Amino acid sequence: MKVEMEISDQLISDQIESGFAFIGYWAQDWEIDVVNHTGWVQEVEDGDKPEPITLNFEKAVKIAAEKYPRILDENQMDAETGDMLIQLAAFGDIVYG
């Protein structure tokens, strides 16, 4: 079964912004443009500073719609679902938590 969803730019911006409060346990540095849905993160690692990972929120929204639709439910939005969206944008899946 295929279900289509209309996702507003504001919902994505709100999810990204709420995720900032939660990504510190896996990201040591980041720069995210909430308005344009772009940015990068660096994972927490011992030793050398890791290369930045470019965030792809367009891909993240598609994956979320297919595998994790609650992330895109405006009634379920919180720091945890924002973190999940940022992870999808970085890794293509939920890797932490």
Image (tube, helix red, strand yellow):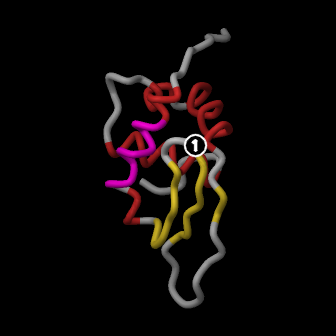
Q: Residue furthest front?
A: 35
Question: On the picture, is 70 further left or further right than 64?
Answer: left
Residue type at numbered disc 1: Asn
Q: Residue at x 58, y 84 (%)?
A: 49
Judge whether residue 17 is colored magenta: yes
Quarter of the figure with the N terminus? top right
> Residue 75's spot in the image, x, y percent?
32, 22
> Residue 47's spot in the image, x, y percent?
55, 90
From the image, tell me which residue sits under label 1.
36
Number of marks in picture: 1
Q: Is residue 5 above or below residue 47?
A: above
Question: On the picture, is 86 further left or further right than 91?
Answer: left
Judge whether residue 27 is colored magenta: no
Residue range of the region highlighted in magenta in the rendering: 13-21
> Residue 60's spot in the image, x, y percent?
61, 39
**How would you rate the neighbour count of disc 1 (Cα within 10 Å): few for under 14, some for 14-19, many for 20 or more?**
few
Q: Residue furthest bottom?
A: 47
Q: Residue at x 63, y 34 (%)?
A: 63
Among the 4 quarters of the image, the one containing residue 18: top left
Q: Is residue 9 above or below residue 87?
A: above
- Classified by dominant secondary structure, the portion drawn in magenta counts as helix
Q: Secondary structure at mark 1?
A: loop
Among the 4 quarters of the image, the one containing residue 10: top left
Front position in the image: 69 or 77? 77
Among the 4 quarters of the image, the one containing residue 80: top left
Q: Is residue 91 above or below residue 49?
A: above
Q: Residue at x 42, y 38 (%)?
A: 15
Front position in the image: 92 or 29? 29
Q: Is residue 31 above or below residue 4?
A: below
